Image (cartoon, grey):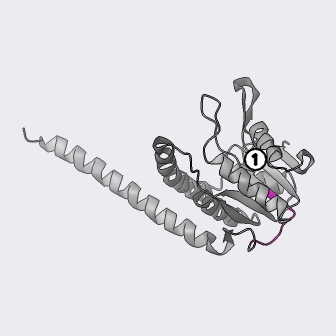
Amino acid sequence: MSLSRRSRIIFIFWAAVALIAALEAVLTAAWLVRASASELYASVQDIPAREVGMVLGAPEFSNGRPSPYLPGRIKAAAELYHAGKVRKLVVSGATRPEKFYDEIASMTRMLVELGVPEDDIVGDGKGLRTLDSLLRMRDVFGYDDFITVSQRDHCERALFLADRYGVRTIAFAAGLPPGATPDQLLFSMIREPLARVKAVLDVAVHRSAKYPVQR
């Protein structure tokens, strides 16, 4: 059965929307990569030392298990600490006691298990988004030059946002999760391009942090 003229128009319209969205995601990715190239490091030896590092959180799953990306970030942050590249670590994520959801507690526990003293770990439970985490490091905690720790694609997005908002940071790329399931990796592959487009939109409207001053 052939498609009606109306159906063909609808199909062409949505195909065009999908094509534009895909093109926008590719261009955004290229833009973010260029913007972050000189400030992103993958070697503990090469990265310059800073007083503090910020570890970006990752959502826990409904069964309470941490995201498979989080252990890599924690391991990278601990390596920076033990190498003397940072003296303190800020773990930034969401804390929602009413939902028994606490990224900060999980991240702190994992760092302590890797030998980082708890006294040298600061928690920010209002780092709801990457942009919030960056702005709060500067405006709430008073750090004007620090190391951001996450996986490479997340670091590229963080550096792009930091540059546009005047936040001074360099970034350290953590390893990819070796134990991630295919569906978890697929979720990340879909989520990151959308997050990058949103980062560009946040810059365009100069969105502020949800909790800009509360500690």
Apparent side of residue 168 relative to residue 184 in the rendered image (left or right): right
The residue closer to the viewer here, 50 or 35, is 50
Apparent side of residue 41 relative to residue 3 in the rendered image (left or right): right
Residue for point 72% across, 49% down? 132
Query: Farthest right residue?
Result: 119
Residue 136 sits inside the magenta stretch: no
Question: Toward which corner of the image does residue 65 lie, by quadrant?
Answer: top right
Can residue 10 be seen in this snapshot?
yes
Residue for point 80% across, 40% down? 109
Residue for point 78% across, 37% down? 105
| 56 versus 65 height, above or below | below
> Crowding at label 1, few (<14), some or many (≥20) Cα neighbours within 10 Å?
many
Q: Position of residue 144 (x, y in %)?
A: 83, 63
Q: Main secondary structure of the magenta part?
A: loop
| 88 versus 7 height, above or below | below
The residue closer to the viewer here, 207 or 162, is 162
- Part of the protein shown in magenta: 47-53
Query: Farthest left residue?
Result: 1
Residue for point 69% across, 43% down? 128
Name the residue tied to disc 1.
92
The residue closer to the viewer here, 179 or 197, is 179
Q: Name the quarter where the N terminus is drawn.
A: top left
